[in-house]
Image: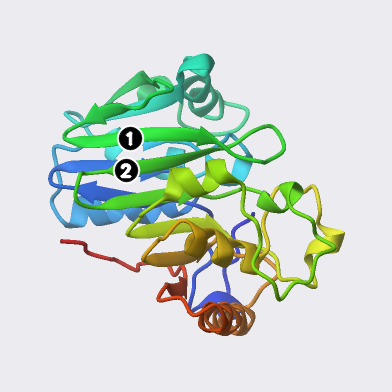
Amino acid sequence: SSPTPGHRTRIFGGNTSCVSVESGDQVFICDAGTGMRDLGMRLIRDKRLPFEGHLFISHSHWDHIQGFPFFSPVYIPGNTLHVYDPAEREKRVYDLLSGQMQGDYFPVDFSSLNAHILPDRLEEAGRSIGGVHVSAMMLNHPGGSYAYRFDTGEQIVVYATDNEIDTELDTSADPSLPRAIPERFVNFARGADLLIADAQYTEEEYPSKSGWGHSRVFTAVDFAIEAGCKQLALFHHDPMHSDADVQQIEVAARARVARRGSNLVVFAAREGLELRYR
């Protein structure tokens, strides 16, 4: 929810949300948090230029857009970045990204960017981009948030952060029992090779955070199991959690998977982690 530099987060990292999903020459970017700066540096270091990218913002809260002005490829001529909005919110994300670069907030104006920044739309049924079918689904978060599904026909990655599934669950139920995850979430993530899911709160923390827009760790685990996902990345770590806290959460999540007799592979998201699917 906010950058957390320092020794407490050296293992898992302290940037806010930014994930790249890459297929062939296509680079799909999920959210523009402060991690976007490191992504831009990697793309340049790996000589991925000229660059054509596709940016999908889950929602416009500050921690998901504040890295955009530090994304180096948008300053380089010949690069192109498509900025997508769900159909009903035409150009809203584009306007927000450009608005945060006004002089009151940032020293470089949006009009000074040398790359082509193009507003685009993602229809309700999704669309094919470079052989990857991309679709979106509304999540439970104050002000709204979207999940994205990337399907090559052989591999599927689902990005679903800032999502309080627990608002649709009976939180008074026995926490050791499997949770009845709403069907729309299960169907959207069904069969994913990787589900990147909001898992910000522990069971003990959640009661005082209800309504803040984030899920419990065990809810994320049950979500992945019910959807038949192969791997689950626990995502959107709480800024109050140290590396040691995240490691304990990871252990607890794996124990729940074992109790449920599932083959799900679960791990805490970590900066710089790269997964390859063939």
Point 30% across, 50% down: residue? 156
Quadrant the C terminus occupies: bottom left
Pinpoint residue 36: horizontal percent, then vertical percent: 41, 49
Q: Which of 173 and 250 is in front in this view?
A: 173
Number of other residues with Cα within 10 Å of mark 1, as a class: few under 14, some 14 to 19, many 20 or more:
many
Point 66% across, 50% down: residue? 165
Pinpoint residue 183: horizontal percent, then vertical percent: 56, 45
Give the mark nearest the N terminus, 1 or 2.
Answer: 1
Pinpoint residue 71: horizontal percent, then vertical percent: 37, 43
Q: Is residue 168 left or right of residue 65?
A: right
Residue 40 shows in the view? no
Judge whether 102 appears above or below 19 on screen: above
User: Disc 1 marks which amino acid?
Assistant: Val
Q: What element carries label 1?
A: strand
Pinpoint residue 8: horizontal percent, then vertical percent: 60, 79
> Which numbered disc covers residue 150?
2
Judge whether 110 appears above or below 17 on screen: above
Point 46% across, 76% down: residue? 262
Residue placed under numbered mark 1 in the picture: 134
Judge whether 212 appears above or below 123 on screen: below
Quadrant the N terminus occupies: bottom right
- Is the Cβ of the residue at disc 1 closer than 8 Å to that at disc 2? yes
> Which numbered disc covers residue 153?
none
Q: Is mark 2 on a helix, strand or loop?
A: strand
Number of other residues with Cα within 10 Å of mark 2, as a class: few under 14, some 14 to 19, many 20 or more:
many
Point 21% across, 44% down: residue? 152
Q: Is residue 35 left or right of residue 198?
A: left
